[in-house]
Each structure stands twice: as C-alpha cells, then as structure tokens.
Image (spheres, rainbow, N blue to C red):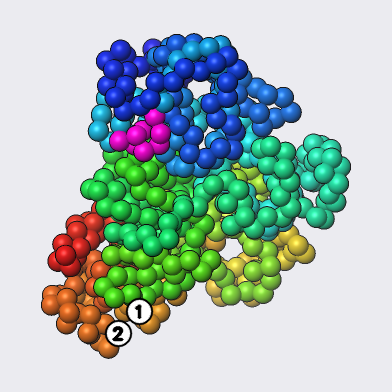
Amino acid sequence: MITDHDIAFPTLTAAQIHALRPRGTLRHVGAGETLWEEGQRGMPFFVVLEGEMEIVDPSGDEVRRITVHRAGEFSGDVDMLSGRTSLVRAQMLGPGQVLELDSEALRRVIREIPDISEVLLRAFLMRRQLLLSDGYRGMQIIGSRFSPQAHAIREFCSRNNIPFTWVDVEQDPLAEELLCRFHVLPEQTPIVVGRGGELLANPSIPELAHYMGLEAHVAEGEVFDLVVVGAGPAGLAAAVYAASEGLRVLTVEGEGVGGQAGTSSRIENYLGFPAGISGPELARNALLQAQKFGARISVPQSAVRLGTQGGLRVVTLDDGSRLVTRCVLVASGAEYRTLGIPNLRQLEGAGVYYAATEMEARLCGGEEVVIVGGGNSAGQAAMYLSRHAARVNVVIRGDDLGKGMSRYLVDRVERTPNITVHQACQVSAVEGDGALREVRLRYAGVDEERVIPTRALFLFIGAQPRTAWLSGCVELDRNGFVLTGEETKRDGLSVEAWKEAARAPYFLETSLPGVFAAGDVRAGSVKRVASAVGEGSMAISFVHAHIGAAV
C-alpha cells in the first residue's frame, strides 16, 4: 500500500533524471555544505545524484532532522513555486553531486513534462502536510485569545498557510517563560517570535507578510497583460488560465487566498468532490496550480483606485504603488455585513467573528455559541462548530430555514441534537468588556429578551461588494455590484473609450474596455464557488480578445 511518506519522498526514475539533466547544472558539493538556509527566498531545486542531503528544522530550541534525501530523491516543497521564504535548511552530510535547477527552470519542467510534474506537485503538497503534522513549530504568536490584534495575526497566518504555534497568555504555561525571555509584559502582547528567534512586537499585517516573503516583486516599468484584484475562487481560476495560456499575470489579495470560500469548513456541492473539500484545501490547491504556471500572487495588497494611462489600465494599491496592465479582472468579492448594534465593532476578533475556521473552533470547545444567518455559510458553520461546541444556536429572522439554505444542509442541521434554530428572532444586544460575555436575543412579538452566555458570536448575514476602489471609473448597480455586458449603461464615464473600441462590451466586461468582473462582486452573479470559478476562467477568453483587438 502506498503511504503518505511514499508520496512525499519518491525516487525519480533514471529516465526522469535524464530528462532533467539538460535543464539544470551539475554541481559537486562538499561535506557539511549548506545548500540553502531557513528564511532564504528563491532557493534552487536539487536532485541528489550522489551522497546524502539532510533537511533540518531549526525553528525549535534544538535543530531537528526532517528527512535525508539520497540518490534519485529531490528537495523542495510548495515554497519552491510560491517564492516564499524557506521553512527549513538543507545541508550535505558528506561529499556528493547534485543537479541544480533555478525556480524558472523548475516551473518549465512542471509545465512541460507531465509525468515529472505530477510526482513533484504531489510530493510538495504532502511534504507540507507532513511537516505541519510532525511538530514543526514555525514562528510563535504569543497573545490573548481575547485580543483582536492577536486574532487578526492568527487569522492572516491561517488563511495564507503560514505555519505558526499559538501561545495563549491565559492558558499556556510556556507564555510566561517566553515573555520573561523577551522582557515583554502580558499587556504588550501580541508578539511574534520569528523562526530565527527575532522578535516582532505587535506587527502589522503588511510587516508580517514582508517578513514571510508573501509580496511579489514588481520591476519598475513592468507592464502586465492582466492584473487580477482578489484571490478568491474567481481570481485564482483566472490566474490559472491566464498563466497557463502565456499571459503575464499578477494577482493581488488584501486578506487571504481563497476569499470567503477559503474559510469554509467543507464545500460539499462542488463538482468533482463527492466527499466534499474544505475551503482551505481548495485554496491551497488552486494557489499551487496558479504558481505552477508562473502566476504571481501578492499578499496583502489591496486596490484603492483604478485609472487609465493611454491605452493601458492602472491599479493603485494601498501602499501607493501602481500596477500598469493591459487588462484588469475585478474579483475583489464581497464581505459579510455586520449587525447595527452597540458595542459589536469593539468585540470583533474578541468574540465576534465572520468565519468559522479551525482557529475559531478551538475557542469554542465545550461552550455555547451563537450563529446569525440562514444561508449555506451559516449552515456549514453550524455543522462544523457542533463538533466542538456544547450547543450551537442558529438565529434567523424568518420562520423557514429552507428559504436560504440548501436542503441537504437543512436536514443535517435539524437532525443534529446540539443545534437549536431560533426562528423569527434577532440579536438585540451584545455584552462584554474587552471580550464577548453574552448575547441577547429578541423574538418577534415577544417583549422579553433571552440571554445566552457565550464567548463566540458568528455573523453570516449577507454580503456587500468590495467596490469602493472602482467608484467613478466603472458602472455599479444601486447596491454597489459591478455591472457587466449588456447591463452596462456606457454613459459619460466611458463613452469616449467605447467609441475608440468600436464594439460592445463582452459578457463579463465592465463599462470600461479591458476591465472585467467575475464572481461575487459582479451584479447578477450566482453566489456559488463553481460559478465563480467558471466566470474567472471564462474571463480569460475575453482578455485575449481585448488584447488581440488592441494590437
């Protein structure tokens, strides 16, 4: 039987090594020679021809051996394609010979030699899983479970597949030791202890991303064929298809790869996955697939303005940098709405959440939680949290859960004994000083409130589009969603541009030629993962048509 270890550490055949030789450089290496360091970016890919290569994890108090590559085996994991900094160090145990390929040569191999590509990608994905399950500590985040800042850092790391160890100042005995070592008071947390022992005191998300090497480098004067704004299902699908067809593509994402779908505990109605697939897994696979073809992904970078420069489009980012491109795909998605009640904003990240991932589930062990919303996201969250919480209270305004939730989810929710559905009900107040303590419910036609002591309130109450950055540049509907195709009015905002284009907008094209929209941000879109993937893929054919007409 083939094991996970067999998948993670295969031996290349003589024919496969022969196919790689013209694409790399033979290199003689000495005993003890370091091939790359932990934290290094852009490390090469090595095939061991003679000798032994040791991979070690220096992130803990002692250097720990992960594996030893022998003749015919190869180095690397998903960071080989992502361009992120390495989590491990590689060194030779004795003299030997290796075949070295740089990152671009490796991408060409993956694109051009399918049988080698399959072996490498399966190994890269499995190695990361084994590394995390085998005690890899990574960086340490020290803080309070009730701290919004600590929650934001942990959420960002989780959504972007950054390995970390959480140290809770309220519950973990290790916290006091670490705080004493770094001369930090509990009230000065959160802090991040880097893999090399360096201290990041309450880092901003951009500072943390820079430390981990998540942002893409853009050369001065570089012009892209396509800039994708948003790395949800639509944006990632567009990146995959654009890069695989030879377009120069950059995807920018302000929060986490995968969008809202990336926070889903399980997606069960996505074609091709009869047993379902988790949102994080879908996002990881899509990200690797895009990077396999050479797409560049930059996190966290948010678009703040769209403009034009001659026949090109310009996306201005929140750090002031400008991306010049022939086409833009708006895939910035939508964000969950919040409740208009006092104190709620102050408790976000300290008991009020907009996603139910593994990180939030750990906070709910044995406790009572409240979910507001009657859509599929709320149903999926209820089923997931019911495995951790003592009781899950689902609050809906209407009197029928089936109005907004798929039948299969309704049946599961209703059959789960520790889930209670509160119909014709709404949250009237939340209480807490620095952390959520209780939620008050009010039923239609009833004067008295019901108080539920809880440390976790989850909100899934509809979404509003992330389109403020498009104001004054492309047509939006009255709810802020992007109009495309025949729905565009093509009024004073873009009339001259369309006269020059001498054509009507394509199906997914906005009121500005060369700017397209896909996924939840588009007016009239079907709010499903499969639909978003389809639109993102379809948009690339229109991108080709626009670029071809402009040549």
SS at mark 2? loop
Left or right? Give the position of 517 relative to 193: left
Residue 312 in the image, given as x and y percentages of width and height: 29, 70
* Residue 73 sits above or below residue 267 on the image: above
Q: Which residue is mark 2?
A: 493
One can see residue 394 in this view: no
Residue at the outermost bottom position: 492
Q: Are marks 1 and 2 in contact (CB under 8 Å)?
A: yes
Question: Which three-letter amino acid code belongs to the residue tagged 2?
Answer: Leu
Residue beneath the point at 29% across and 48% down: 243
Q: Earlier in the sequence, mark 1 or mark 2?
A: 1
Residue 329 rendering spot, x and y as whole percentages: 32, 63
- Mark 1, residues whose alpha carbon is within 10 Å: few (<14), some, or many (≥20)? some
Q: Residue 106 bears which disc, if any?
A: none
Please check the rendered image and state whether residue 458 is part of the magenta-colored stretch, yes or no.
Answer: no
Regarding mark 1 in the picture, which secondary structure is present there?
A: loop
- The amino acid pointed to by label 1 is Cys
The label on residue 473 is 1
In the image, 431 versus 491, the foreground residue is 491
Q: Quadrant of the N terminus?
A: top left
Looking at the picture, tell me which residue is in the foreground, 537 or 403: 537
Q: Where's residue 542, x and y in %?
A: 20, 61
Q: Which residues are magenta?
A: 101-108
Q: Is residue 36 above or below residue 372?
A: above
